[in-house]
Amino acid sequence: MIEAEQFVAAVRAYGFGLWSGVPCSYLKPFINYVIDDPGARYVAAANEGDAVAIAAGAQLGGVRAIAMFQNSGLGNAVNPLTSLTHTFRLPVLLIVTLRGEPGLPDEPQHELMGQITQQMLELMGIPWAWFPSEAAAVERTLQIAVAHMERTGTPYALVMRKGSVASCKLQSQPEVRPLFPVAAAERQLPESTRSDYLRVVQSAVSDTDLVVATTGYTGRELYASDDRENQFYMVGSMGCASSFGLGLALAQPERRVYVLDGDGATLMRMGALTTIGYQRPGNLVHILLDNGCHESTGGQSTVSHSVDFCAIAGACGYPDSRRVANAEALRLLLQSPPRMLRFIHAPMRTGVPDDLPRPTVTPVQVAQRLSRYIARV
């Protein structure tokens, strides 16, 4: 058994500065210690997949990150692990607890996952090792993990057994953050297209700003409008753009980060809004492009027409939530952006440009050039 402080100090020496995760009783000493540690940052995620996306965004922003969660939540993390961290070669260190370990008594819901946790990691191409239970093993374990991450650009997992870390009581209390009133949003027929909105965003961003575009037509149209080095085209990992943008914004607090989201993607992982609203990074602009359907898969309807996204964002802690009627209104709104977290709901017409191309840059190239851009500009 080790002390939480021993592991936290060791990973800090390797440059790990952000932790994100979902609680598990096995992880309690870590989470409690990191929350109380003024030199560490813990971001409580709404689900395990969001934790991976937050950590991936921080990693791309230049801050090594750790995602930790119970093995029962590994299923929630499969999509971002296979279509985000693997696809873009973003090495995140995983700490996955082994609930339901064969031979040990545990709750019945952990039985199957306890039998297949390591096989799931191996099936996803994620090498793993046992989480060190002795202080003398911490450094060597981290050397192997970091060497793999640096060599391959992919995650490495530490599987934690029960009793690996000594108890650590939480000392601090969470900061209670006030909500902000949101005016009722008026419903109007959409006037602008996705391309109209994207051109406005590209005209508004500065050389130091970063843009994250959700999967589907949003990334493709942004690329077709003008391919830029400061743009990240998310492929797959649907619903993770906002969490990824949060991690990026936390890692790069001096840069403004624009997240271009979709209604279907937002609805898929709406819990991310609660995490973002609590963290409230003043450099994040979350723009929801809403056409009321899953357009890239054939136009199947979403339920966005019955959802007040601005009210939800405000209730989740976004200090500024706006609804724009058209691209011109968005242009005016982005002319003098405040230094605060902002949510913008932008209803739009359906339709895509004829012969819309797919990006010729690969996901790995997109991630690498954005990383170089951050280091250079």
Image: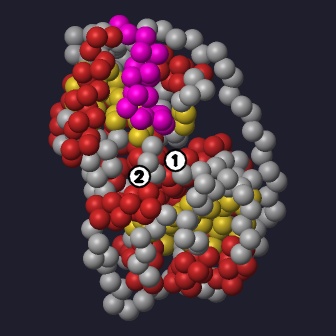
In the image, residue 136 sits, relative to residue 213, either above or below, namely above
CB-based contact (under 8 Å), mark 1 and mark 2: yes
Residue count near mark 2 (Cα–Cα under 10 Å), binned few <14, some 14–19, many ≥20: many
Q: Is residue 82 visible?
A: no
Q: Is residue 142 visible?
A: yes
Q: Which residues are magenta?
A: 1-21
Q: Earlier in the sequence, mark 1 or mark 2?
A: 2
User: Can you tell which mark lies on residue 251?
Assistant: 1
**Residue 235, position as x, y percentages in the image:** 35, 64
> Residue at 26% across / 48% down in the picture?
153
Disc 1 element: helix
Disc 2 element: helix
> Residue at 22% across / 16% down in the picture?
102
Residue 4 belongs to magenta span: yes
Q: CA distance from mark 1 to mark 2?
A: 8 Å
> Residue at 29% across / 72% down in the picture?
361
Residue at far bottom of view? 354
How many tags in the picture?
2
The one nearer the camera, 337 or 218, is: 337
Residue type beneath disc 2: Leu
Residue count near mark 1 (Cα–Cα under 10 Å), binned few <14, some 14–19, many ≥20: many
Describe residue 82's horizontal placement relative to residue 240 as left or right: left
> Residue at 44% across / 22% down in the picture?
8
Which residue lies under the disc numbered 2?
A: 60
User: Can you tell which mark lies on residue 168?
Assistant: none
Residue 2 belongs to magenta span: yes
In the image, residue 221 sits, relative to residue 376, either above or below, namely below
